[in-house]
Image: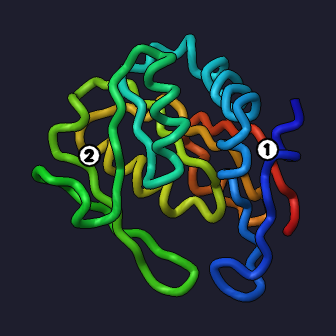
Amino acid sequence: MDLSKLVRGVPDFPKKGILFYDVTTLFKDPAGLRGAADELYKMAKDLNITKVAGIESRGFIVGGILAEKLNTGFIPIRKPGKLPAETISESYSLEYGTDTIEIHKDAIQKGDRVLLHDDLLATGGTALAACNLIEKLGGEVVQVSFIIELTFLSGKEKLKKYDMRSLIQYNSE
């Protein structure tokens, strides 16, 4: 199945000049959602994963499915103020400023083998910040997976120390 045919390109979102790759159209297609989850599962099934972490918010959808398939717990990584218990945070650079993500302080135990998942890899800042949070808590990032990788933005370079996987690669906008 060619999953890229299920991804909608939305021009000028969230700002003029940006082509947004919308995976919600893939998610609403039962065969597409199942196909994406199955392919990502195959990449991780032999890695002895003990936790799956997903980045807010689209990373929660397939991340949750992967946690179920891998028989692990699921860890949400969220924007500040969204998690109810004690958290640690990591800030990272954006094209025009900074942002921050958080994880519950008790989400990862020392020695946990973690699969980090998000829907899309662009510049890699968010994913690297999430990896840093997992490692600060004593977890090992065993694999980082994405549905889409925008190769022309070179986010993979920031994640080169990790086993990084993606299902769909776009080489230009």
Which quarter of the rendering shows the C terminus? bottom right
Residue 27: give x, y in percent of width and height. Answer: 66, 42
Q: Nearer the viewer, residue 163 or 30?
A: 30
The residue positioned 88% from the left and 36% from the top of the image is 2
In the rendered image, the vertical position of residue 137 relative to residue 156, given as above or below: above
Horizontal side of residue 143 vs 67, given as left or right = right
Where residue 45 sits, quadrant-wise, is: top right
Horizontal side of residue 124 vs 115, given as left or right = right
In the rendered image, the vertical position of residue 75 relative to residue 93, given as above or below: above
Where residue 79 sits, quadrant-wise, is: bottom left
The residue wearing badge 2 is 136
The residue positioned 66% from the left and 85% from the top of the image is 15
Q: Residues within 10 Å of mark 2 (few under 14, many from 20)?
A: some
Indicate the amino acid at tag 2: Lys
User: CA gap, disc 2 to disc 1?
Assistant: 30 Å
Which quarter of the rendering shows the N terminus? top right
Residue 118: give x, y in percent of width and height. Answer: 54, 47
The residue wearing badge 1 is 168
The image's mark for residue 113 is: none
Indicate the amino acid at tag 1: Ile
The colour scheme of the drawn protein is rainbow
Q: Nearer the viewer, mark 2 or mark 1?
A: 1
Labels in figure, total: 2
Q: Quick check: marks 2 and 1 in contact, CB under 8 Å?
A: no
Q: Residues within 10 Å of mark 1 (few under 14, many from 20)?
A: some
Residue 153: give x, y in percent of width and height. Answer: 73, 66
Q: Sequence-wise, which precedes: disc 2 or disc 1?
A: 2
Residue 36: give x, y in percent of width and height. Answer: 70, 32
| Element at label 1 | strand
